[in-house]
Amino acid sequence: MTAIARVDELACGKVLTRTARRPTGEEVGILLLQAGEGIFAYENLCPHMGVPLDGGTGRVPRKRDHVFCAAHFATFDAATGVCIWGPCQGRALEPVPIAVVDGEVRLHWAAS
Ligand code: FES
């Protein structure tokens, strides 16, 4: 399992962006955040138009338990990835499987 962040990097409420490779070799952008007691990872692709939520800046806007797409301001629940407002309402960010081990967040993709 590949480590993509330390848990303590998420404590301040930031949304981290990372790039990783799937077991198939495909590169994928990842959003990583903490909400409540949970840590969540999603593909960095908005379900509205398939563009990165951060608009390529590396910074994803967040307010409390919501994250926003920089393109058209869709609002996503941080813990579920579901769009609760905006042009993709009802659709969701694609979750990325992770595991927290020894203070690290590690990708947990099944080998293909
Ligand atoms: S591309 Fe994200 S809200 Fe339109």
Image (tube, rainbow, N blue to C red):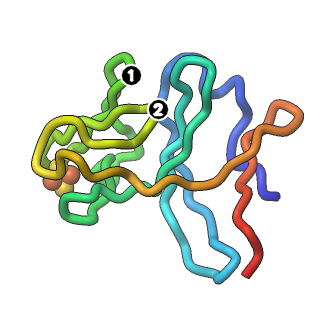
Tell me: 71 left or right of 11: left
- Element type at marker 1? loop
Question: x and y percent of residue 7 in the render?
Answer: 71, 29
Q: Which label is found at residue 35?
A: none
Kindly state the secondary structure of the residue where label 2 is placed.
Answer: loop
Q: Residue 79 shows which numbered tag? A: 2
The residue lying at 56 percent from left, 59 percent from top is 19
Compared across the picture, whether 67 is left or right of 16 comes to: left
Circles 1 and 2, Cβ within 8 Å, touching? The answer is yes
Image position of 91 with respect to 74: above or below? below
Give the left or right position of residue 69, taking residue 104 as reference.
left
Q: Is mark 1 within 8 Å of ligand 1?
A: no
Q: Is residue 112 above or below residue 104?
A: below
3D distance between C-alphas at marks 1 and 2? 7 Å
Q: Amino acid at mark 1?
A: Asp
Q: Which residue is located at x 16 percent, y 36 percent?
A: 85
Q: Quadrant of the N terminus?
A: bottom right
Within 10 Å of the Cα at label 1, are there few (<14), some (14-19), or many (20+) other Cα atoms?
Answer: some
Density class for disc 2 (Cα within 10 Å; few <14, some 14-19, many ≥20) is some
User: Residue 63 or 79: which is nearer the viewer?
Assistant: 79
Q: 20 or 35, which lies in front? A: 35
Look at the numbered disc 2 and say if its residue's Cβ is closer than 8 Å to ligand 1.
no
Report the residue at 73% width, 57% height from top.
108
Which residue appears at 27% of the width and 62% of the height?
Answer: 51
The image shows residue 43 at horizontal and vertical percentages of 46, 57
The residue lying furthest to the right in this view is 102
Q: In the drawing, does residue 29 fall left or right of residue 81?
A: right
The amino acid on which the numbered mark 2 sits, given as a three-letter code, is: Ala
Q: Position of residue 58 (x, y in %)?
A: 41, 45
